[in-house]
């Protein structure tokens, strides 16, 4: 894991859970020869969380909604893949106590709804299957109440106390997601310019802690129309960032590189 910035006391870093932003790929990620190992290695470097709070690109719902707190069937929210991917399982324990804590933290700031029958979508269970394959860490998923960077940053800020309670907050997306512009003739070592340029810009903003530029991505980011024709896969980043922005620590690039032209760069905010 490559450290790219450090300016906080080690005692603070070691007593609080980090917040993560990760690329979740697509169902074939679980069969990739490289990426599952990178995710597993990353999980192995983390202190084992008491629970995971997941915010996925694949669930925008207002008001913010809390998903199932018991083990319910997964949500196979993808199409056109081989049948074996619809047989994937991830029976992680529910997290009812975490759900109640989320309600306590958010109730004074925004309305909350309930989606008790909603299982984990693939933005949640695909990376978790690689990171904790035993499915023995309790997981709670909540929706993004909007795609606005400011609103999501504020939601992350409201959830920040969970880091002191051994809860791992994960924003799950994809740092570039221009599916319509993928060029199957290009290798992952030679990504298209739109993906490489956006990836480099975001990495630089994070490294320099230029969070104002990052928040203003609609005006400042290069190749946005290609890298993120819709921004749902970018904006979970702001929940993770919000959870740490008032107590900044180190920032690590945990995974980098490209997968089918798309940047899988992932960050750990300590």
Image (spheres, rainbow, N blue to C red):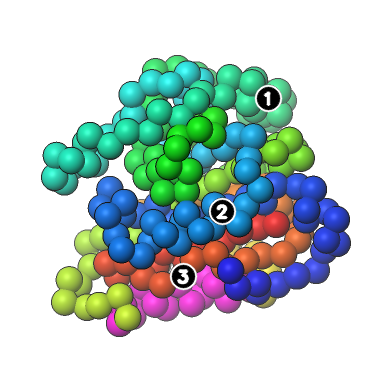
Q: Secondary structure at mark 3?
A: loop
Mark 3 Cα shell of 10 Å, populated few (<14), some (14-19), many (≥20): some
> Which range is magenta?
190-207
Marks 1, 2: nearer the viewer: 2
> Which circle marks residue 44 in the picture?
2
Q: Which mark sits nearer the N-terminus, 3 or 2?
A: 2
Marks 3, 2: nearer the viewer: 2
Query: Taking the image as drawn, is residue 106 in sight?
Result: yes
Q: Main secondary structure of the magenta part?
A: helix
| Position in image of residue 162 (x %, y %) | 70, 37
Query: Taking the image as drawn, is residue 229 in sight?
Result: no
| Position in image of residue 171 (x %, y %) | 52, 48
Q: Is residue 135 magenta?
A: no
Q: Which mark sits nearer the N-terminus, 1 or 2?
A: 2
Mark 1–mark 2 Cα distance, whole angstroms, equals 26 Å
Tag 1 near tag 2, CB within 8 Å: no
Q: Is residue 133 left or right of residue 162?
A: left
Tag 1 near tag 3, CB within 8 Å: no
Q: Secondary structure at mark 2?
A: helix
Which residue carries the number 1 mark? 101
- For the C terminus, the quadrant is bottom right
Which residue carries the number 3 mark? 256
């Amino acid at each position: 894991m490559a450290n790219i910035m450090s300016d906080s006391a080690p005692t603070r870093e070691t007593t609080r859970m980090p917040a993560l932003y990760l690329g979740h790929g697509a169902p074939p990620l679980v069969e990739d020869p490289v990426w599952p190992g990178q995710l597993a290695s990353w999980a192995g470097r983390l202190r084992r969380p008491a629970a995971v709070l997941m915010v996925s690109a694949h669930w925008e719902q207002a008001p913010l909604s809390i998903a199932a707190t018991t083990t319910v069937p997964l949500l196979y929210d993808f199409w056109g893949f081989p049948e074996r991917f619809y047989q994937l399982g991830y029976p992680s324990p529910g997290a009812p106590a975490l759900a109640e804590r989320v309600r306590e933290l958010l109730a004074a700031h925004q309305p909350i709804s309930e989606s008790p029958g909603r299982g984990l979508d693939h933005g949640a269970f695909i990376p978790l299957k690689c990171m904790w394959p035993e499915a023995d860490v309790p997981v709670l998923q909540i929706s993004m109440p909007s795609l606005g960077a400011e609103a999501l940053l504020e939601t992350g800020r409201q959830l920040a106390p969970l880091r002191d309670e051994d809860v791992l907050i994960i924003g799950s997306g994809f740092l570039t997601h221009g599916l319509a512009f993928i060029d199957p003739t290009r290798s992952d070592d030679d990504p298209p310019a739109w993906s490489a340029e956006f990836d480099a810009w975001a990495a630089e903003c994070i490294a320099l802690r230029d969070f104002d530029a990052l928040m203003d991505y609609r005006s400042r980011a290069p190749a946005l129309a290609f890298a993120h024709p819709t921004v749902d896969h970018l904006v979970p980043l702001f929940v993770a960032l919000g959870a740490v922005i008032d107590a900044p620590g180190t920032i690590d690039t945990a995974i980098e590189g490209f997968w089918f032209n798309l940047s899988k760069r992932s960050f750990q905010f300590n």
